[in-house]
Amino acid sequence: MCDKSWVREFRGLYEPPLYWLIFSLGAVGNLMVVFIFTTVRHRLKTMTDVYLLNLAVADLLFLGTLPFWAADATRGWVFGLGLCKILSAVYKINFFSSMLLLTCISVDRYVAIVQVTKAHNLKNKRLFVSKLVCLAVWIISSLLALPEFIFAQVKPDHRGNSFCVLVYPNNLFNRTKILVLALQVCVGFCLPLLVMVLCYSVIIRTLLQAKSFEKHKALRVIFAVVAVFVLSQLPYNGLLVVDATQAANTTIKDCAISGHFDVAGQIAKSLAYTHACINPFLYVFIGVRFRKDLLRLLRQYTCGLNQRGLNKMQAVPKRPSVMSDTETTPALSL
């Protein structure tokens, strides 16, 4: 039995401050995204809008679990078996839903840019279809996260501290663990990545032949979101493959190497968590429509504060108009 107390000490020092930072930045950013999407009139105009709103909701759902994992890293799991199972499944639901939603965005952009005639014919049905697709994404993600819920357990270490961990059945060649890990990597990463690469390859070829640059503005945010998610998830999924190989034939037998592998897993996992706080800021700095909507709301809020100050000095207030009744944002600008 390997003594990995130093690994737990590293986790207790490394994870809590990082998790709280991700939680703080992510909560502010994603709440801002949800606020923009739900308060600006006619904001949900495209299927991509619906997908991005669901992506922000998924990130908020996941971010709500980070304070619990930070507490687990410092003083062990004190929240009971039920929360251990639920919170273990929430991350996987977020992971699968995010990958599937990004896949849906790439397919939607492919239809809108490459299959223009088909997109126009389905214009009136696309929002309804996108809501059905999102419902299917959440159901599929929940089903794929069931193993996390089933196998999550609260186990004590040699010091008597309890931790929320995954405990797979000890069957022949660890088949259950290998099957679960293979399903996660294939369905949650490889398949969506393949679809995204194919769609965006055709989109790039189409845009290179186009004269308008408006479509390039619309794609900047999508490319950035996809790139950040893939780069943040690739190390974690790579380690899942190594973990599956280790479960099959125990390739890592040295305790020191095994401990360093565990540390690498913690770092890769925390890197995967960062996508939840990076995405909203990509919308603000890259998305044209989102940036305009945010500035409009900020101007409205500022004018509202100034007007309340004037109301105290004037008997008859005069409120300036800051919101336009017409939507001037380009249709393809995010």
Image (cartoon, grey):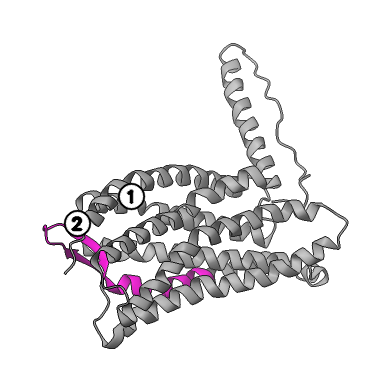
Residue 320, position in %: x, y? 70, 25
From this view, report whether residue 13 is shown above or below residue 272.
above
Counting labels gives: 2
Residue 7, position in %: x, y? 25, 56
In the picture, measured across the screen, residue 223 lies left or right of residue 114, that is left
Under mark 1, the amino acid is Glu
Q: Which quadrant of the structure image shows residue 314?
A: top right
Residue 332, position in %: x, y? 75, 55
From this view, report whether residue 319 is shown above or below residue 204.
above
Q: Are marks 1 and 2 in contact (CB under 8 Å)?
A: no
In the picture, measured across the screen, residue 30 lies left or right of residue 261, that is right
**11, 111: nearer the viewer:** 11
Q: What SS does tag 2 mark?
A: helix
Q: Quadrant of the N terminus?
A: bottom left
**319, 158: nearer the viewer:** 158
Q: Which quadrant of the structure image shows residue 309?
A: top right
Can you tell which mark lies on residue 79? none
Residue at left offset 68%, top offset 72%: 198
Task: Give the magenta-colored segment's residue range.
Answer: 137-166
Q: What SS does tag 1 mark?
A: helix
Can you tell which mark lies on residue 5? 2
**56, 73: nearer the viewer:** 73
Residue at left offset 42%, top offset 73%: 241
Q: Answer with mark 1 or mark 2, whichever residue precedes in sequence.
A: 2
* For discs 1 and 2, the disc positioned in front in the rendered view: 2
Residue 48, position in %: x, y? 65, 60
Q: Which quadrant of the structure image shows residue 78?
A: bottom left
In the picture, measured across the screen, residue 222 lies left or right of residue 156, that is right
Q: Residues within 10 Å of mark 1 (few under 14, many from 20)?
A: many
What residue would you read off at disc 1? 15
* Residue 125 visible at all: no
Residue at left offset 30%, top offset 86%: 173
